[in-house]
Amino acid sequence: MKAKVIENRRLSEKDFLLSVNLPELPEIKPGQFAMIQVRKTGQLDPLLRRPLGIFDVEGNSVSFIYRIAGRGTRLLSKEQEEIDVILPLGNHIEETAEKYLFIAGGIGIGGLFLAAKQFHLKGKNVTIVYGGKSREDLSAMPFIKKYGIPCITVTEDGSEGKKGLVTDVLQDFKETTWVACGPSGMLKAVKEKAKLMNVECYLSLDTRMACGVGSCLGCVIKTAEGYKRVCVDGPVFKSDFVEL
């Protein structure tokens, strides 16, 4: 559908917040994503859309946090009045526990914040572990603070919070359901830590996609049951189900 751009503002050197108003808001569940057309109306290049996690929903507006990573996201950051979106796509983060630990690596917060916010407002015991290379990677902190969600920050250079990696602070959350989203190396480390601690853990995979609706098979991953498509079978999987 066509969505009116409300704002597309810079949060840090590389991160932006894109908020759009939809003519009709479908039911959106936490953890789902959208396929965003980054080219301007009437143009054909770039042909492929970009997948973005649905960061937040307020009324008829939907927002996304994205990082400039290449030509497509750079074009998205330019001023536009209207964009074409397909949403909501994929499965979602299910509300099945009382205690949650959301583990976000940098821009991975885009796939986790809506769940953390909604579960927190419902009275669940929610904590976010938010990590990056430096303070610049933690661009969603103002939104986390706005809702008073408990948050532990970790940076590799020590410029914000604890110096180190997100896996350094997970040992105190054994009786908690983990949900992680971020770089593949981080997800692999979280998966291994969850296995060692015998913790229920889910991974939201931030995978390159072409169509987002299961047709092209461009985002398949190896799992315990053969190959699965991240866009329709995920993006949320049990950590022991996927091979990273």
Image (tube, rainbow, N blue to C red):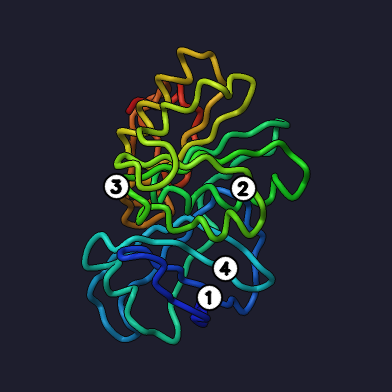
Left or right of residue 173: residue 123: right
Within-10-Å neighbours for mark 4: few <14, some 14–19, many 20+: many
Could you say which quadrant of the image residue 242 lies in?
Answer: top left
The percent coordinates of residue 41 (x first, y second) are 35, 84
Within-10-Å neighbours for mark 2: few <14, some 14–19, many 20+: many
Frontmost residue, 158 versus 214: 158
Disc 2 versus disc 1: distance between alpha carbons? 19 Å
At label 1, the amino acid type is: Val
Foreground label between 3 and 4? 4
- The residue sitting at 37% across, 65% down in the picture is 12
The percent coordinates of residue 212 (x first, y second) are 40, 55
Sequence order check, earlier mark of 3 and 1 = 1
Task: Name the quarter where the C terminus is drawn.
Answer: top left
At label 4, the amino acid type is: Val
- Element assignment for label 1: strand
Sequence order check, earlier mark of 4 and 1 = 1
- Element assignment for label 4: strand
Within-10-Å neighbours for mark 1: few <14, some 14–19, many 20+: many
Q: Which mark is residue 20?
A: 1
Identify residue for label 2.
115
Q: Residue furthest right?
A: 123
Disc 3 versus disc 2: distance between alpha carbons? 27 Å
Sequence order check, earlier mark of 2 and 1 = 1
Identify residue for label 3.
218
Sequence order check, earlier mark of 3 and 4 = 4
